Amino acid sequence: DADVTQTPRNRITKTGKRIMLECSQTKGHDRMYWYRQDPGLGLRLIYYSFDVKDINKGEISDGYSVSRQAQAKFSLSLESAIPNQTALYFCATSDFISGGEETQYFGPGTRLLVL
Amino acid sequence: LAKTTQPISMDSYEGQEVNITCSHNNIATNDYITWYQQFPSQGPRFIIQGYKTKVTNEVASLFIPADRKSSTLSLPRVSLSDTAVYYCLVDSSGSARQLTFGSGTQLTVLP
């Protein structure tokens, strides 16, 4: 969805390096998410944010940190990258309706390779 | 954390109806079920969402039995362009947000 952009689209880095993946959205949504996708494992939630002041850990937050700079921007950092963080990373936004009714809109993904 | 299970792959022919089932035995009372479609090199895309019974939109139907321990995505009259990976998601919107995606079902539509 062009309304959710991720940079870079591909990244190769070395073990121990700090890297940042960025996500921007023009949909005006308050809620934003970071996931990683590994072959055969589906998507797993890393962090989520309900608004600029609200950030929460997801299922697999160890080794990651996030920053919500503005409603439209949500960045994911790997403080010291390790090879098992090699994966496809997706950012998503959502329009919360009520209860659990919520549609997520995903970015195109960032493919990260840690050597 | 809710656990979801889907078949790894399915094959179908153009024009047939395809049903993909996801089991989620420990779904909580307020959890919603959502299905997403993903093409290679793209992010997942929303298909349909439901809480109970049946939901239908312009592209699919979602059947959820009374015990809510499974759900079935139904795609009517599939075409080659429906070849993709389909994920079910159990969305727990409690105080600690839990989003449990299934591992995905690769649907291949044959001519």
Image: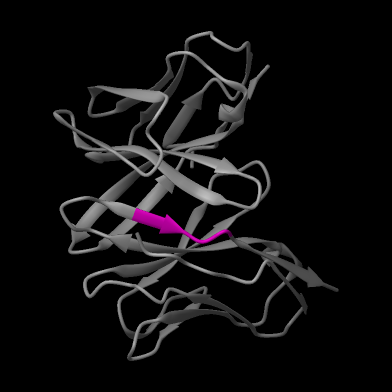
Q: Which image quarter: residue B74?
A: bottom right
A93 lies above or below B9: above
- Residue A78: quarter of image: top left
Q: Of A22 and A13, which appears nearest the observer?
A: A13
Q: Residue at x 43, y 76 (%)?
A: B57
**Main secondary structure found in the magenta portion:** strand
Task: Indicate yes or no whether the magenta region holds residue B100.
Answer: yes
Horizontal arrangement in the rendering, residue B91 relative to residue B78 (left or right): left
Up-down relation of residue A59 to residue B88 (above or below): above
| Residue B91 on image: x %, y % | 32, 61
Quarter holding the C terminus of chain A is: top right
- Position in image of residue B63 (x %, y %): 44, 85
Residue A24 relative to residue A68: left or right: right
Q: Magenta residues, as a range? A: B99-103
Residue at point 58%, 51% (across, down): A41
Q: Is residue A82 visible?
A: yes
Q: From what the image shows, is residue B37 above or below residue A35?
A: below
| Rendered image quadrant of residue B79 | bottom right
The residue located at (34%, 59%) in the rendering is B1
Name the image colouring.
one colour
| Horizontal arrangement in the rendering, residue B70 relative to residue A14 (left or right) | left
Relative placement, left or right, of B59 versus A14 is left
Q: Position of residue A95 (x, y in %)?
A: 27, 51
Place of residue A44 in the rendered image (x, y in percent of width and height, measured from the top left): 46, 46
Q: Does the stretch in magenta take in B22?
A: no
Residue occupying the point 31% across, 83% down: B52
